[in-house]
Image (cartoon, rainbow, N blue to C red):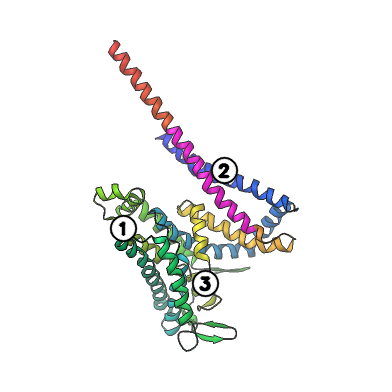
Amino acid sequence: MKRLDRDKLITAVGAPVLAVLAALVLTSLIILISGKDPFRAYQVMIEFGTTDRSAVYIVNKSTMFFLSALAVAIGFRMNLFNIGVDGQYRIAAFFAAAVGGALSLPGLIQIPLIILVAMGVGAIWAGIAGVLRTTRGVSEVITTIMLNSIAGAVIGYYLTAGRLGEKDGNLTHTPNIPESSHIFMFGTSVGDINGFVVFAVLAGFLYWFVLNRTRFGFDLRSVGRSETAAAASGVDVKRMIVTSMVLSGAVAGLVGMPTLLGESYNYGTDFPLGVGFTGIAIALLGRNHPVGIALGALLWAFLERTGTQLEFEGYDQKIVEVIKGIIVLCVVIAYEVVRRWALRDQQRRVGEELARAGSNDKAEVGA
């Protein structure tokens, strides 16, 4: 047991450390090739990223990143590649905003209603891919890509004046949600922390609890490892696939809620885009574990925040995108290296145990 715990610790800690070190080395080389000082770049990023105002920004931004990665991770644990989170959260936020803007109820009623509408729309949108996978054998990768485009088309059609949108200068957006339905904020001297961070923490805990402490989570992970073995043990594989996609979509529906309920209070043409694809990278970075995902989301928000400051210091802002790509690549490679090392170490120990058992048997026969 102690040996097993040590191996798990090495895999959990060794791979991220190896990935970070490799990413720092490669990034430094790239910055040097561009003719800039990498140590100065890191100094600027640390100094600017650790200010109080930057800390508030990073926490707020990482909330969206965390929820997006959590939605992706649910699919990953089932060996499903849900790359439609971007379309799911956008269409969910759009219809939730339309419902919220059309009603004027007490906040205690309307805020949960808006959240439930968003989760329901996201679940339905992702469930389409799950149903097509189980009934027609269509890859969820293809269907979720297509559904992303369809979501954008649906939003574009309805987000026009005279339908569900209204013109406001150069922008078009849904009617504003009443002030009574704005999410609570944690006020600080340098800015407000979005209260939806509480919902994000709760979602992370539920994700961990369901997957690791319930029969449903065990079945889900079993199907992800081997559909054949899971089916042989009595698990309804098709039902689990659809359920997992629905849950992934429901969580995806929460991604736009921090912005909708705590910042914009409507869905407009300036609503954040691309967060779903960021979630894929962060889920890989966090290895589908809520703690790892949270750290990855904070890192991503930190890099996004400090990238603008690097530009003022004469660095190309695109260097941050290069850093992100290198980090993800290094994480994938590092985990594979550590996994193979752990497998070889396990095989070696099993061989030693078998050899030891064989020597004991011979000794007993000789006696």
Residue 80: image x %, image y %?
Answer: 39, 56
Residue 251, visible in the rendered structure: no
Q: How far apart are marks 3 and 2 (CA)?
A: 35 Å
Residue at 31 percent of width and 63 percent of height = 136
Q: Do the residues labelled 3 and 1 touch (CB within 8 Å)?
A: no
Report, in whole angstroms, how far the alpha carbon at label 3 lies from the one at label 1.
31 Å
Q: Specify whether residue 232 is in view.
A: yes
- Give the amino acid at mark 1: Met
Numbered mark located on residue 159 in the image: none
Q: Nearer the viewer, mark 3 or mark 1?
A: 1
Which quarter of the figure is the C terminus placed in?
Answer: top left
Q: Answer above or below: position of 222 versus 346.
A: below
Q: Name the residue under label 1.
A: 240
The amino acid beneath tag 3 is Thr
Residue under numbered circle 3: 259
Residue with the mark numbered 2: 18
